[in-house]
Image (cartoon, rainbow, N blue to C red):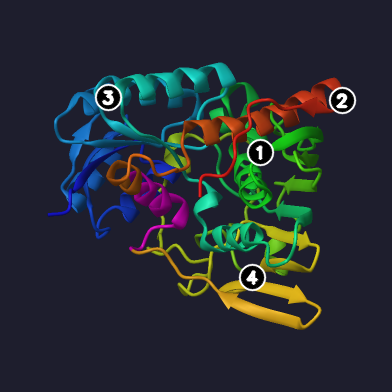
Amino acid sequence: MEQVLRVGVAGVGDAGSQVVQAVPGLAGFELTAIADTRQDALLTHQEKYGTQSFTSVDEMCASDAVDVVYVATPNKFHVANALAAIANGKHVIVVKPLALTLADSDILIAAAAKADVKLVYGHSRIYDPPVKKMAEIVRAGELGRVIQINTWMYGGWLQRKPRLASELSTDAGGGVVFRQAPHQADIIRAIGGGLVKTVRAVTGRWDVNFKETEGNYTAFIEMADGTPVTMVMNGYGFFSTRELTHGMRAAGGPPTEERFTTAADEATKYQPAPRRDYFFGSPEGKGQPFYGFTLVSCEKGDLRQSHSGLYVYTAAGCEEIPCSSYPGKGRPSVTGALLALRDAIAEPKKRYPDGRWAKATLEVCLAILESDREERDVRLSQQTRGPW
């Protein structure tokens, strides 16, 4: 009989609610508990899913009701919450970023190894089928070596959604570098072999209402094999890369027309709103999820996402390659982490997106901030190859 992993979700805000939607119906998993400080959120999920409710993450981690803790709390709590899970012998999935410092990442990696539990990186675009397919094609060598990668994301992260004060402070782990750069760093590392050599970046704080964090960055990255990469993020909400991606989004419905100029309270941030139970990029549930626009150039051709897979451009023309979807109804960034954990438990020697991968991605993000602050190239030393 297949082992059923009982999942407890720490924090049911934006990221946690995606986990709650993904677990039910996913073979081999059962949603059994949630932890949150908001009583209304606990009651809502208890009524809908029959979960046990905890106002303390530590208490949930100590409960016999869970085998796996999915940490989806605000960034500054990731380390403490993950350590609580590990201390109780639970496997743990932590949404990006793993931590806010490399030293804290090392603490989590060492603790998981000592406790002999799995530490899995969650809410990452490395699990998106088109990203995995591009990496697969590159590894196969069909198009020769990679010679260039460009990934752009323009959207309304900063102004088009209500943000808590912690999301609007870089010191608290907020802003586009900590919150969004991990997605792009995962994409370019998954496709480009995982090893970033140097980062040169400039960030911007151009919204007069949110001066405590970055709203944009441009990073020039050199991979270990010399491949040049650009990572561009703009969160001010004027132009959207959806114009370049068939109107497709990472997930969810259309952005609000409202522009926010102050931090939101929890009531505004988490006000009830209709949510669609799908992971695909379009509201109709068709196609693959997009995170901005990524173009991969190789010696013998180019790759980019299509509506349902990839376009491959070669001397023979353009071919579309479809990509399969993940099982269940969760987004790949969520479902993929759960399946990676399941496989890692079943096959102990199997590689997966672990704490070392998450730490290496965090190193890229920290290098963006350091490069901007010190106006220099930053050489990286904590990189690791891809997990697939």
Q: Earlier in the sequence, mark 1 or mark 4?
A: 1
Q: Residue furthest bottom?
A: 316
Determine the main secondary structure of the stretch shown in magenta. Answer: helix
Name the residue beneath numbered marker 3.
Answer: 56
Q: Secondary structure at mark 1?
A: helix
Residue 304 picture location, percent across and down: 69, 66
For marks 2 and 1, the one nearer the N-term is 1
Q: Is residue 388 left or right of residue 196?
A: left
* Residue 164 in view here: no
The residue where tag 2 is placed is 376
Which residue carries the number 1 mark?
176
Between discs 1 and 3, the one toward the N terminus:
3
Element under disc 3: loop
- Which residue is at 81% across, 63% downward? 299
Number of the front mark, 3 or 2: 2
Q: Is residue 25 above or below residue 167?
A: below
On the image, which quarter does residue 365 sit in? top right
Report the disc number at residue 233: none
- Residues in magenta, as a range: 328-341
Query: Residue 337 lies in magenta, yes or no?
Result: yes
Query: Which quadrant: the N terminus?
Result: bottom left
Q: Nearer the viewer, residue 70 or 350?
A: 350
Task: Between residue 43 and residue 261, name the one nearer to us.
Answer: 43
Using the numbered discs, state the Cα–Cα distance from disc 3 to disc 2 in whole angstroms. Answer: 43 Å
Relative placement, left or right, of 60 versus 382 is: left
Label 1 vs label 3: CA separation? Answer: 28 Å
What residue lies at 48% left-to-right and 31% top-to-bottom?
355
Amino acid at dot 2: Arg
Residue 199 percent coordinates (x, y) = 78, 33
